[in-house]
Every structure is written in structure tokens, then in C-alpha cells.
Image (cartoon, rainbow, N blue to C red):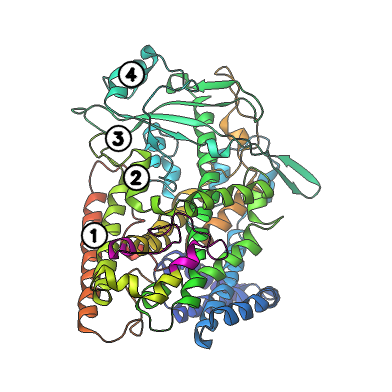
């Protein structure tokens, strides 16, 4: 017994350091050592676990060997690079086994039979994996609004320029709501001054409700497509943080009748307003996973990879620049397709709709970007949503920190390409470059529409090439970091960010059913924790830290690279200062350069 206790204590020490160990950027070898140490201590404490994991790893190896060979033939990647890419996937699979195991060590099975779950029941699931800090504040209205500009999906909010029949707020209601938050304001002034913003999840409209089937038990899930209205207090107010005004959604997926909720509807138990907010967070989580994350980062970057390998010869300057930002992306995308988004797997089980509908909405999200490439650079997306003005929307950490990273990347790409292309004429004369761009725009190639400066996808100016390449790099590094690593910080807390609701939405303000009744079961909550902890934990590489062999020896190039790193360091200093400001209700750390990998590799 004493030996078991010693082994158990050692295992716990390892597990307690798991968060910090795997969250820091490391080489493949560092991660390998960590995994082997955890596996060894798990085997000592629980004999027989190793054999089970070996079987799992063997299955993964067999499943991906054929794909690994295909990638090798397609790209002509060196053997060392193939090995690293494949080892990375195997390590992720082994880490997933460990996470799933340790998360269940203290799980109380009797909780599942409880008829009235409380937040405490969900909190007990975080026995070894640390409970996210958002658990202490997610019910607050100001935090609910703040998450729209600094949460896992700060990409839906857009300026509200005219009243919408779905949000029939009266001037009297608006004034009362503003007063509830200590703000003196009128609806007409807020609208005229451009201080109203809405998050509209209409892209989810029409999705069918899904089911979760386990042990012959079918649980009905409910998807919704709400619209949520927010306001910025007028200038001179003590705070200029967004506050929530109203939430509206259709009573059912086929109903044309909308039901409206406001903070004025909250009773002593915060119902039904709390249920309405939870439905928005559920919709936001589904939008995040399928559109903002999978569709508009993973799948947007992928079409650029094959043409880069096939049409840009080795040592071509653009190939040298882009390859580090593609490392691991195709393989991890294949893993997502085969493991996460396959029927019966995590997306099918956890998200609110059916897997077929989820695949379709992810594809639509991807197409909305790839079919309109010239409008998806960081600045243009902000302008399109009307959220670029810091006078009307002064507190928007994603925008403000993202601009620092975008500017650093854009400056680096401009400095880099200026070394190799002294003029626009040099761009036009580079036949390999023109073949690359034409292939990307071709229906037989990348099918990236509105790419290039003419209908054939040709690039005629260095300025355009700089913006296009900056967009690719930003999407595969900073944009993905913002939506991926926030999964662990926020979305791993299930009561605040359920991936599905299991109770029909309230159909009137008289409905007093607790928002708790619609949350996933503890089993489903455990599965969500396991999946998002893994996806939001593993950092590999750092933005700006290229391999020494990535570029040829060139004094000008080395100076530009050093400048890039200096700009990133300056951005980090500014972001850290902003995060200490009282304006930020919570730190926004996803755009810190130290938290941004070079590529989509998880």
C-alpha cells in the first residue's frame, strides 16, 4: 500500500505539471520525453495501461501509414520531415489517451444519476485538470458581453446600423436596460452614434437538431440560431465596455415566431435570461468550432500547400518563406477529418446538430473565405463587420492585439519579398510565381476565387503579393492561435460553453426552467473537457522562430528577420501592458507572440 501511495504521489506531481509542460512551445523531442515519463508513471501505478495504449498507437499507425505515404509522394518531403509530422500525430494520440485516463481517475459515477445537477457537480469533473478561471464569472452580464470581443470567438460581432424586426426593443426598454448597468443613454443616440453591435448566428439557421446515442439511450440535442444585441456606453461614461441589451431566437427550428429576452427578465435566479445567454454561448461554440476554427483557419490554409510544393521549386524565396507556416497542417487536417469530424466521433457526439449538417456548414464557412480571398485579410474583415472604429467600439482586445501581430507579419513579409523582388516587373517576370498563383485560382487547382489581380489569378504588384502572403501566414499562425487555444481557457468549462443544449429553448419570459436542465450530461461534459483540453494545450513552434536552415545566408535577410522578432517583442510588451489595464475585464493572451505557433499543427 505504501508503494502504491508513493507511485500515486509521483504520478500526481507529473500530472499537476502537465498544464505548464505541454502549454509551452517545445521541440518534438521535449514533448516525446514528457509523454514517455507520464506513460511510465501511469504504468507503474496502474499496471496494464501500457498495453492498451500500445494497441491504440498501433491502430493510429496503421490508419495513417497510407496517408503518410501519399503525402510523401505528393510533396516530396524529406524523410526527416515525414517522420516529424507522423510522430507529432502519434504523440497527440498518446497524449489523448493520458488525458482521457487521468480525467476519469476521480470521476464519481453516481453523479450521472442525479436528477438535479448543480454547478458543483460539473466542477467536480475538474479533479486533476485545472478548472478554468471563467467558471467564477461566466454568469455575469458584463463578462457575457466581454466575451464577444475577447472570448474564443470574437469574430461574429458586427455594427448594428438599423433596427431589426427580430429585436423589437422599445426606447423605454433600452433606457431601463442601460440604467440597470449604470449607464444613462437612449436608443436613438446609441443607434445614431454607431454604438450598437449585434452577434447574429444566422449561418446556423436551418440546422437540424442532433442526437447523442449511448448505451441504447438517445438524448435529444437542440441547436438555435439566435441574435444578441449589445451596446457601448456613450463617451464620458465610467466604463465603455459592452453591455447586453437583448437576445432573440426562433421558438423552434421551423418556427417563424421569435421570442425576445432582455436583462430586465432576470429574476432572483437569473432565469430565463440566463437560459437565453447560455443558448447564445452554445450557438457561439458551434459557430466557433465549425466556421471560425475548422472552416476559416484549417481549411482555408490547406489549398495553398500543394501548389507551394508542386509549383515553387526548392530554394524559391516564396517557398522558403511559406513552408514553415504549413508544417503539420495537412496531416492534422486529415486527423480532424478521420477522427474528429467522422460519424460517431467528437463533433457528431458533442455538437448540437448532425454530423452531415456540421460538415456542410464548415464547408460553407470555408467557401465564404476561399471564394472571396481579396476580402479576408485581417483589416478587411474588421471593416466588413464595422468593428474597426475604436471611437465607437473602444474595447476590443482581439482587434487591437491582432493589429500589432498583423503589422509585424506584414512588415516582415514586405521586407523579405523586397530583397528578392526589387520592382513590380520582377514579380511579373517570375514564371514560377505566376504558375503558383494561376494554379491557386484555377478550378483544377486551389479554387481560390478572387485571388490575384486579374481573372487568371496573376499577381502584378509586390504590394498585392505582400498582402496575400501576409494573409496566409496570419491565418495559419495568429488567427488559428486565437480560436484554438481559447478552447482550453474558456470552452473547456462546460456550463459556460456547452457544445449542445439538451432542453428545448424557453419559449417565453414566463418559462422558469433552469438553464442547468439543458446542459450536457456529466458524461458528455467529460468528453468535451477531454477533447478541448487536448486541442487547446499542445504548442509546437513559435511565430518568428524559424529553423536556422529555413533561409539562405544573407545579411539583408538576417536583418529583416531580426527586425521581425524585435517587432514581435514590442507587440508582446504592449499586449502585456494592456492586459494589466482596468479596461480589460480579463487578460487577452491569445495574440501574445509566445502563444502563437508558426503553423496549424494541432
Q: Which residue is mark 4?
A: 187
Mark 1 and mark 2: Cα distance apart in space: 19 Å
Q: Secondary structure at mark 2?
A: helix
**Which callout, 1 or 4, points at the residue further toward the start of the chain?**
4
Q: Which residue is mark 3?
A: 241
Q: Secondary structure at mark 3?
A: loop
Magenta span: predominant SS is: loop
Mark 1 and mark 3: Cα distance apart in space: 23 Å
**Which callout, 4 or 3, points at the residue further toward the start of the chain?**
4
> Is residue 141 shown above or below 360?
above
Mark 2 and mark 4: Cα distance apart in space: 24 Å
Residue placed most toward the observer, 281 or 195: 195
Instruction: Tell me where residue 477 sits by quadrant.
Output: bottom left
Query: Does residue 490 appear anywhere in the picture?
Result: yes
Furthest residue to the right? 216
* Quadrant location, the N terminus: bottom right
Q: Which residue is mark 1?
A: 571
Is residue 446 within the magenta segment?
yes
**Which callout, 1 or 2, points at the residue further toward the start of the chain?**
2
Q: Residue at x 45, y 61 (%)?
A: 456
Query: Does residue 602 appear anywhere in the picture?
Result: no
Of circles 2 and 4, which is in front? 2
**Tag 1–tag 3 contact (CB < 8 Å):** no
Mark 2 and mark 3: Cα distance apart in space: 18 Å
Query: Which region of the structure is painted magenta?
Result: 437-466
Q: Which residue is mark 2?
A: 382
The disc label shown at residue 250, or none: none
**Which callout, 2 or 4, points at the residue further toward the start of the chain?**
4
Total count of labels: 4
Amino acid at each position: 500500500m505504501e508503494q502504491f501511495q508513493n507511485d500515486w504521489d509521483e504520478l500526481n506531481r507529473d500530472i499537476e505539471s502537465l498544464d505548464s509542460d505541454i502549454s509551452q512551445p517545445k521541440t518534438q523531442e521535449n514533448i516525446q520525453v514528457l509523454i514517455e515519463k507520464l506513460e511510465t508513471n501511469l504504468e507503474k501505478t496502474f499496471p496494464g495501461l501500457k498495453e492498451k495504449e500500445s494497441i491504440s498507437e498501433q491502430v493510429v499507425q496503421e490508419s495513417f501509414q497510407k496517408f503518410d505515404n501519399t503525402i510523401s509522394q505528393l510533396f516530396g518531403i524529406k524523410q526527416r520531415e515525414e517522420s516529424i509530422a507522423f510522430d507529432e500525430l502519434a504523440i497527440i494520440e498518446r497524449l489523448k489517451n493520458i488525458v482521457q485516463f487521468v480525467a476519469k481517475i476521480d470521476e464519481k459515477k453516481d453523479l450521472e444519476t442525479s436528477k438535479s445537477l448543480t454547478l458543483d457537480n460539473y466542477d467536480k469533473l475538474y479533479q486533476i485538470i485545472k478548472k478554468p478561471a471563467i467558471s467564477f464569472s461566466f454568469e455575469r452580464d458584463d463578462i457575457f458581453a466581454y466575451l464577444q470581443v475577447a472570448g474564443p470567438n470574437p469574430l461574429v460581432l458586427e455594427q448594428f446600423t438599423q433596427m431589426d424586426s427580430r429585436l423589437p426593443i422599445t426606447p423605454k426598454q433600452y433606457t431601463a436596460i442601460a440604467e440597470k448597468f449604470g449607464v444613462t443613454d437612449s436608443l436613438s443616440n446609441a443607434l445614431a452614434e454607431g454604438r450598437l453591435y449585434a452577434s447574429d448566428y444566422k449561418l446556423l439557421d436551418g440546422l437540424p437538431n442532433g442526437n447523442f446515442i449511448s448505451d441504447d439511450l438517445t438524448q435529444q440535442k437542440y441547436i438555435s440560431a439566435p441574435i444578441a444585441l449589445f451596446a457601448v456606453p456613450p463617451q464620458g461614461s465610467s466604463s465603455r465596455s459592452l453591455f447586453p441589451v437583448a437576445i432573440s431566437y426562433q421558438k423552434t427550428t421551423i418556427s417563424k415566431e421569435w421570442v425576445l429576452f432582455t436583462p430586465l427578465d432576470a429574476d432572483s435566479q437569473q432565469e430565463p435570461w440566463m437560459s437565453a445567454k447560455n443558448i447564445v454561448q452554445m450557438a457561439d461554440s458551434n459557430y466557433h468550432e465549425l466556421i471560425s476554427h475548422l472552416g476559416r483557419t484549417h481549411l482555408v490554409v490547406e489549398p495553398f500547400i500543394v501548389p507551394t510544393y508542386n509549383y515553387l521549386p526548392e530554394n524559391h524565396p516564396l517557398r522558403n518563406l511559406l513552408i514553415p507556416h504549413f508544417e503539420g497542417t495537412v496531416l492534422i487536417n486529415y486527423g480532424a477529418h478521420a477522427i474528429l469530424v467522422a460519424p460517431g466521433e467528437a463533433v457528431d457526439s458533442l455538437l448540437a446538430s448532425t454530423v452531415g449538417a456540421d460538415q456542410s456548414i464548415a464547408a460553407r464557412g470555408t467557401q465564404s473565405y476561399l471564394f472571396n480571398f481579396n476580402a479576408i485579410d485581417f483589416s478587411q474583415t474588421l471593416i466588413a463587420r464595422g468593428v474597426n472604429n475604436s471611437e465607437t467600439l473602444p474595447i476590443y482586445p482581439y482587434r487591437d492585439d491582432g493589429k500589432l501581430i498583423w503589422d509585424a507579419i506584414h512588415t516582415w513579409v514586405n521586407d523579405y519579398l523586397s530583397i528578392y523582388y526589387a520592382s513590380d516587373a520582377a514579380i511579373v517576370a517570375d514564371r514560377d510565381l505566376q504558375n503558383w498563383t494561376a494554379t491557386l485560382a484555377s478550378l483544377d487547382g486551389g479554387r481560390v476565387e478572387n485571388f490575384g489581380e486579374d481573372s487568371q489569378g496573376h499577381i502584378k504588384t509586390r504590394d498585392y503579393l505582400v498582402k496575400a502572403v501576409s494573409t496566409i501566414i496570419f491565418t495559419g499562425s495568429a488567427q488559428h492561435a486565437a480560436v484554438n487555444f481559447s478552447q482550453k481557457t474558456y470552452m473547456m468549462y462546460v456550463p459556460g460553453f456547452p457544445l449542445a443544449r439538451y432542453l428545448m429553448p424557453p419559449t417565453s419570459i414566463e418559462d422558469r426552467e433552469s438553464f442547468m436542465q439543458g446542459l450536457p450530461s456529466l458524461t458528455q461534459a467529460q468528453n468535451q473537457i477531454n477533447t478541448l483540453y487536448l486541442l487547446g494545450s499542445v504548442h509546437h513552434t513559435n511565430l518568428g522562430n524559424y529553423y536556422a536552415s529555413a533561409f539562405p545566408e544573407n545579411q539583408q535577410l538576417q536583418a529583416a528577420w531580426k527586425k521581425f522578432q524585435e517587432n514581435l517583442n514590442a507587440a508582446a510588451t504592449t499586449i502585456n501592458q494592456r492586459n494589466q489595464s482596468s479596461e480589460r475585464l480579463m487578460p487577452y493572451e491569445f495574440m501574445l507572440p509566445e502563444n502563437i505557433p508558426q503553423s496549424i499543427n494541432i
